[in-house]
Amino acid sequence: MNALQQWKHCPEFIDIDDQSRFVRLLKCNDLYAIRDMAGVHHAELAQMQPVGDGISIVHGIPDAQLLAHAALLPVYAAAKHSPPAVATNRIFLRFQEQLRVESMRGPIEALGFKIVDVPAYAPHSAWLEPVSGRVDEALSKLDLLRALPGAVHVQPQLLRPRVWKTPA
């Protein structure tokens, strides 16, 4: 499956449940993000919005010329004019405090994920990535991660463009 097919297979929405509120982010089919743009020279890239981590948001629909040079990532937003957010293949998972991530390694790996980082200050949480490295696979398995026993919070990594606040 090439980068364009993966981009097209990303879910049309992502549900974010923050215990205090529920947000549904919708996929922006007229935006996409590019990672690792070395060697990319394309006219529509003139309107890029850098978000950091070597990722930029581009208006339009990706074409085959980009596929050989860059990784494509989906862009989501809460509403049409809301700030865009780039979903990566990283997922943050937090269990109940008494449950360490290491004790759940087997079920996590059975879902096709690897544990990338466990914060020293929070051994009940971890950053995960799919073994395949595919963003569409990571996003399509959010509900399976939420169904793990003791899971409290599951959220994809979302990168947003920097917004400068005006002084009051």
Image (cartoon, grey):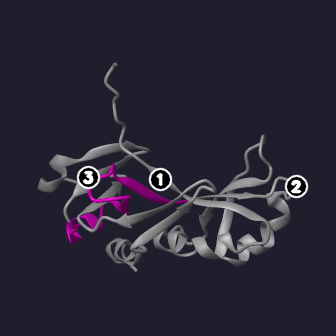
Is 53 displayed left or right of 165 in the figure?
Answer: right
Residue projecting furthest to the left: 43
User: Does residue 85 belong to the magenta stretch?
Assistant: yes
Residue at 32% of width from left, 52% of height from top?
A: 82
What residue range appears in magenta? 61-90
- Numbered disc 3: secondary structure: loop
Q: Which residue is mark 2?
A: 98
Q: Residues within 10 Å of mark 1 (few under 14, many from 20)?
A: some
Task: Give the alpha-carbon distance from disc 3 to disc 1, as whole Å.
Answer: 25 Å
Based on the displayed image, in which of its 4 quarters is residue 119 positioned? top right
Determine the residue positioned at 30% across, 61% down. Answer: 32
**Residue 112 appears in the figure:** no
Dot label at residue 158:
1
Q: Nearer the viewer, mark 3 or mark 2?
A: 2
Q: Which amino acid lies under the numbered mark 2 shown in the image of this protein?
A: Gln
> Left of 13 or right of it: where is 102?
right
- Indicate the position of residue 103 as horizontal and vertical percent values: 86, 64
Quadrant of image for the N terminus: bottom left
Q: Can residue 127 be found in the magenta stretch? A: no
Q: Which label lies toward us, 3 or 1? A: 1
Q: Which residue is mark 3?
A: 39
Mark 1: amino acid: Leu
Which residue is found at the position 51% from the left and 66% from the top?
A: 15
